[in-house]
Amino acid sequence: MSSPSTSAVDERHRVFRCIACGDLSAAASQDFRCVRCGDLLEITYPNWAQSRPDGTRLKATWRDRRASSRAVDLSGVWRFRELLPAIEADQVITLREGNTPLYELPQCSRITGVASLFAKHQGMNPTGSFKDAGMTVAATFAKRAGFHWVACASTGNTSASMAAYAARGGMRSLVLVPEGKIPWSKLSQALDYGAVTCQLRTDFDGCLELLQQLVRRAPVYQLNSINPFRLEGQKTLAIELLEQLDWQPPHHIIVPGGNLGNSSAIGKALVEMLDLGLIPWLPRLSVIQAEGANALVRTLREAAGKRLISVSPETRATAIRIGNPASWKKAANVLEASGGACEQVSEMEIAQAKAEIGAEGIGCEPASAVTLAGLKRLLKQGLVKPGEIVVLVLTGNLLKDPDYTIDFHRGDLFEGTRDQQASTALNSLRHPPIVLDANLDAIIRTLEQAEKS
Ligand code: F0G
């Protein structure tokens, strides 16, 4: 696997550190767990202690790269490569990920009363979710390590992303997904990108458990967010966000929580940026979960963050239908470091927030909408003040789960659930499709009625 330029990259600049016992190692085992205590690993850069990257110079370098046409510079992840594990530019597997827009949300701003409300839309990545930012890094290192097979357990987006990057890198991919619990649009991506796709009769947590066993038995590189290379790539969401805000931190960043890799990555990026002098202070980072998949909420409330309280997950926001989040400890640590909160929101609140974001002409998948729903709760609790600058991280594209959106607008989403009656309160947000005869008068009547409503 080595190329003539391999020696140009100093691999010693990054090490794996166990988040529990602090053990340092140059290499990681197949399951990315500490060989001493079994906890998760993170990547750190000991060289920064001696030769700290200069914040001002970094900002200028990253800005200058925007004018470059090299593939590594066109990637909104590798453009920030000084804060990533080092690799030769010609080995990078990229689909031009990152470079995602930061949108203002004027209508949601009026609804919530938060004067400065933004959405960082990670659903605008090549495969439609935030996973691409981590996958470009982890897939690159999988290839570099000589693996032929990569694998993941997924609620859909990781598998779509992994399959794409594996295909681009000339690797085979194995996907383990819970049968009947991921949207067709996500499944279809994995199929088209050539993954061997197994629909298992279990939930996400069951898939992940089997994957962890598999990587100990077979030469398969695991690309779940337990893999710390993934989180390094996902850090760039926060770096790019701060660049878009001219390095002035918002007061609050709000992110959905599932397996809790993304919140951990964003938190790590914020702490590193503060440490390197790229930002003057840490914004608060808050994590929002669905009520039916609220393991971190319960872990913090009922066990003071000391041990994981697993739950049997149930939510129509299938991306975050996870009961046993792998990165709970990392997420708990970054929440504590930033002074953020962890909240839960109901299915009705998620549906309402998703429709409100959609009405801005942006749209997202249900798991992403927990951020707006969570913001409303944080405002009520006084944890966010109306005068503050708030950024919602929208993690997936609207087109990732069209069934949810159609069910909502047709009024079927809550049919047969305990929310059926109460959900009529959301009727004003619904725009169901109208079936008409192919008749001009009928269309004009419909237009007139719509004008009145
Ligand atoms: N939003 C979306 C759209 C997701 O797909 C996920 C996770 C999350 C939020 C939660 O992020 O796990 O880092 O806390 N999806 C994973 C998957 C689990 O397999 O696609 P997290």
Image: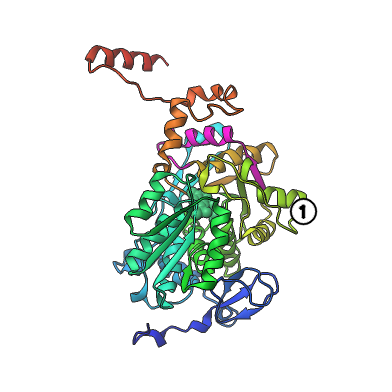
Q: Quadrant of residue 388?
A: top right
Looking at mark 1, is its residue's CB closer than 8 Å to ligand 1?
no
Tell me which amino acid carries mark 1.
Answer: Ala
Q: Tag 1, which secondary structure?
A: loop
Residue toward you, 177 or 223: 177
Residue name at image x 48 percent, y 33 percent: 355
* Of the pair 272 and 200, the residue shown nearer to us: 200
x and y, in percent, of residue 433 in the image: 36, 25
Instruction: Please say if 451 is above or below 212.
Output: above
Residue 407 lies, with reference to residue 25, above or below; the image says above
x%, y% of residue 179? 48, 48
Tell me: 81 left or right of 378. left
Visible residue check, residue 278: no
- The magenta stretch is 341-365
- Which quarter shows the N terminus? bottom left
- Say which residue appears at 65% left-offset and 38% top-offset: 377
For mark 1, what is the residue? Answer: 303
Residue 352 vertical position relative to residue 191 in the rendered view, above or below: above
Identify the image quadrant of the C terminus.
Answer: top left
Residue found at x 54% / y 72%: 216
**Magenta stretch contains residue 59:** no
Instruction: Tell me the quarter of the picture where residue 7 sits.
Output: bottom left
Residue 180 can be seen in this image: yes
